[in-house]
């Protein structure tokens, strides 16, 4: 009698199933890698930033008589009337009159025509960064126009208001540059002065 040993580990069906499983895993890994790379390189924020910059440049080009000074932060500052008082410093309280507009001139907020000045401590976080910075360049009694890019305003998210009938809705969309006409009416010295 001759005994033949059969190698159970060699099974063509087993090998085929194993190869198919390995090939599927490789294909899935390759697909996942390609998907992750394509999503990682697709940043819609960059496109919105380009559109915003184009809007700002178009505004500046269509208003060549407005000689804005570009500050290092990205704020565009134009002094309309030089004030005769002191410059505000951090912790001073600024009393301001303002009008906030979109680049097309549509007003979204103002206190002009009222007796209510906005009263805020300078550079304390109560105002959007661009407006807060712009106030520090004004002397008491001065007026300026500020062109504020969204990174110094409401950023990529915008500004939303809640209404019980409608829910939240955007007042200022994300990536929206803003214009502010600002008058520094008065300064109250901060603590320790």
Image (spheres, rainbow, N blue to C red):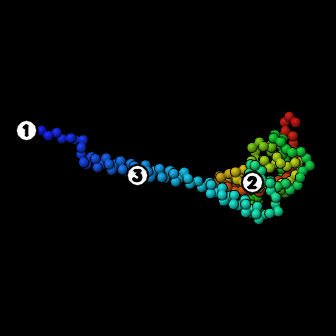
**Which class describes the residues within 10 Å of circle 1: few (<14), some (14-19), or many (20+)?**
few
Image-based side of 9 in relation to 41, left or right: left
Q: Secondary structure at mark 3?
A: helix
Q: What percent of the width, then of the height, locates residue 190?
A: 84, 39
Decide which of tag 1 and tag 3 comes sooner along the chain: 1
- The residue lying at 88 percent from left, 48 percent from top is 140
Q: Give the label, 1 or 3, closer to the camera.
A: 1
* The N terminus lies in quadrant: top left
Q: What percent of the width, then of the height, locates residue 177?
A: 72, 56
**Residue 180 or 126: which is nearer the viewer?**
180
* The C terminus lies in quadrant: top right
Q: What percent of the width, then of the height, locates residue 54?
A: 69, 60
Residue carrying label 2: 148
Q: Secondary structure at mark 1?
A: loop
Residue carrying label 1: 1
Q: From this viewpoint, is residue 14 visible?
A: yes
Residues at marks 3 and 2, CA–CA distance in whole angstroms: 49 Å
Q: Secondary structure at mark 2?
A: strand
Residues at marks 1 and 3, CA–CA distance in whole angstroms: 50 Å
Residue farthest to the bottom, as pictured: 62
Q: From this viewpoint, is residue 164 visible?
A: no
State which quadrant residue 49 falls in.
Answer: bottom right
Residue farthest to the right, as pictured: 84
Residues at marks 2 and 1, CA–CA distance in whole angstroms: 97 Å
**Which class describes the residues within 10 Å of circle 3: few (<14), some (14-19), or many (20+)?**
few
- The residue lying at 84 percent from left, 57 percent from top is 113
Q: Give the label, 3 or 2, closer to the camera.
A: 3
Residue carrying label 3: 27
**Residue 80 or 71: which is nearer the viewer?**
71
Decide which of tag 2 and tag 1 comes sooner along the chain: 1
């Amino acid at each position: 009698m001759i005994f033949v040993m059969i190698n159970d580990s060699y099974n063509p069906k087993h090998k085929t199933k194993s190869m198919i499983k390995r090939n599927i895993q490789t294909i899935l890994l390759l697909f996942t890698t390609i998907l992750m790379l394509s999503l990682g390189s697709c940043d819609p924020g960059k496109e919105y930033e380009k559109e915003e910059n184009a809007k700002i440049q178009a505004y500046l080009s269509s208003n060549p008589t407005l000689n804005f000074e570009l500050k290092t932060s990205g704020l565009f500052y134009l002094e309309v009337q030089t004030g005769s008082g002191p410059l505000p410093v951090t912790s001073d309280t600024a009393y301001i009159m303002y009008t906030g507009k979109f680049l097309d001139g549509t007003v979204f907020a103002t206190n002009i025509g009222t007796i209510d000045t906005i009263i805020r401590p300078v550079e304390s976080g109560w105002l959007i960064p661009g407006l807060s910075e712009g106030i520090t360049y004004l002397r008491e009694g001065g007026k300026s126009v500020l062109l504020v890019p969204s990174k110094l305003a409401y950023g990529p998210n915008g500004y939303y208001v809640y209404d019980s009938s409608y829910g939240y809705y955007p007042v200022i969309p994300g990536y929206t540059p803003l214009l502010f006409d600002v008058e520094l009416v008065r300064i109250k010295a901060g603590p320790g002065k």
